[in-house]
Image (cartoon, rainbow, N blue to C red):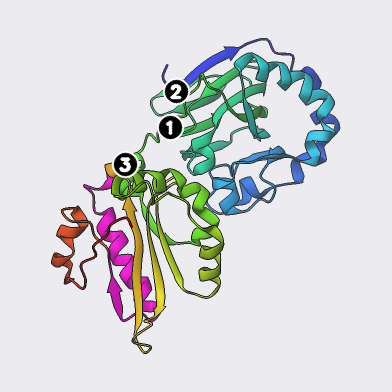
Amino acid sequence: MQHFQRLMTDLAVGPLLDSLKAQPTLWDEITVRQEAPGSPHHDTECIWLRGPRDITLDTVFNELRAVDYPSMHELAQAVYPLVAPVLRQIGSTQLGRVLIVKLKPGGLIDPHEDTGRYAKAYSRFHLVLKSNFGNTFSCDDETVHMQTGELWWFNHRGQHSLRNDSDSDRIHLIFDAVVPSFTVRQLSSVQSNCAAGVRIVEMPMSARIDEMWDLLALHWNEVAKNKQVMVLKPDRRRYEEMERHGALLCLAALDFDGEIVGYSVCFIGPHIHYADLIVANNDVLFLREDLRPSTVGLRLIRETEKVARARGAQLMLWHAKQGTSLDKIMPRMGYGVQDIIYSKEI
């Protein structure tokens, strides 16, 4: 099977089930997962043992760090003896979120794929606490029945759904972990087409430099002509200062998982010689190489123009290296040569 792998059987889940029966109010403490509008988990109840420090729509999809919740401590005597040996056996190097999820009799979990930076970083594992005949778990074109006491890996990036056609609750302990022997897959739907899922958003550059670093390094390696003096070292403090004064405009191209795949950064403000003229001067423009045959680069340029215009800019300036795609496309977008810049080390 491509989307499921059974890893362990006959795990001693009884003590944790007993603890859950003794503390039924834990199911009611955090209900956002099943109550969010459009949630595929509408027929479930959930106990969050570990998760993002603050639960918001953005952190659920994009926050990589996880912290223990009070419920973890309340169930610790049953959870730790069960989960700790499992993590050691599968070779986990980092533990993400941990949830206990109950699907009611006759309940459904609607077809969906797990997207966002978080889903792209972790593999997903199900430890079955309770499951009777009639429970089916489907991912793309594969279906399995996970049985009590088993541990499974499954491809949460595939389109998956669940049915509980039994007459009792289905209860799984679900945990995410970084396990070198398990590679996180690409999305299985059409949304795995990177160009189709890319969106352009405005963002504060100073707060996202670390996320942009790999792209900045690729950009530097590709275009910097005097690398011995043009050492890549973004000045975060100065970017922050410019942002506070409204003098910086940063747009990012984000893929369907929220990863930055391109950016356009401009300095914006009055021209020093023409004080009545607001100029948007592009500092850097870059797009990941595999996306360059698509329309994403053109969308990034157009959106930069649009946002700069909305912020009062009357003149847009771009810096293009000779012979590049940008150099060729600018005249077709109505741009003319403003200056030619020469450089040499001195």
**The magenta stretch spans residue 298:** yes
User: Is 223 in front, or is 301?
Assistant: 223
Q: Is residue 326 above or below residue 181?
A: below
Q: Is residue 277 above or below residue 83?
A: below
Q: Amino acid at mark 2?
A: His
Residue shown at the point (81%, 23%) measured from the top left: 78
Q: Is residue 263 above or below residue 165?
A: below
Q: Residue furthest bottom?
A: 276
Q: CA distance from mark 2 to mark 3?
A: 19 Å
Query: Could you tell me if the residues under marks 2 and 3 are in contact, i.e. CB atoms within 8 Å?
Result: no
Q: CA distance from mark 1 to mark 3?
A: 14 Å
Q: Secondary structure at mark 2?
A: loop
The residue carrying mark 3 is 193
Q: Amino acid at mark 3?
A: Asn
Residue shown at the point (37%, 34%) measured from the top left: 188
Which residues are drawn in magenta? 291-318
The residue carrying mark 1 is 158
Q: How many marks?
A: 3
- Circle 1: is it few (<14), some (14-19), or many (20+) Cα within 10 Å? many
Left or right of residue 335: residue 273? right
The x and y percentages for residue 253 are 38, 54
The residue carrying mark 2 is 3
Q: Mark 2 or mark 3, which is nearer to you?
A: 3
Q: CA distance from mark 2 to mark 1?
A: 8 Å
Q: Residue furthest top?
A: 10
Q: Earlier in the sequence, mark 1 or mark 3?
A: 1
Q: Secondary structure at mark 3?
A: loop
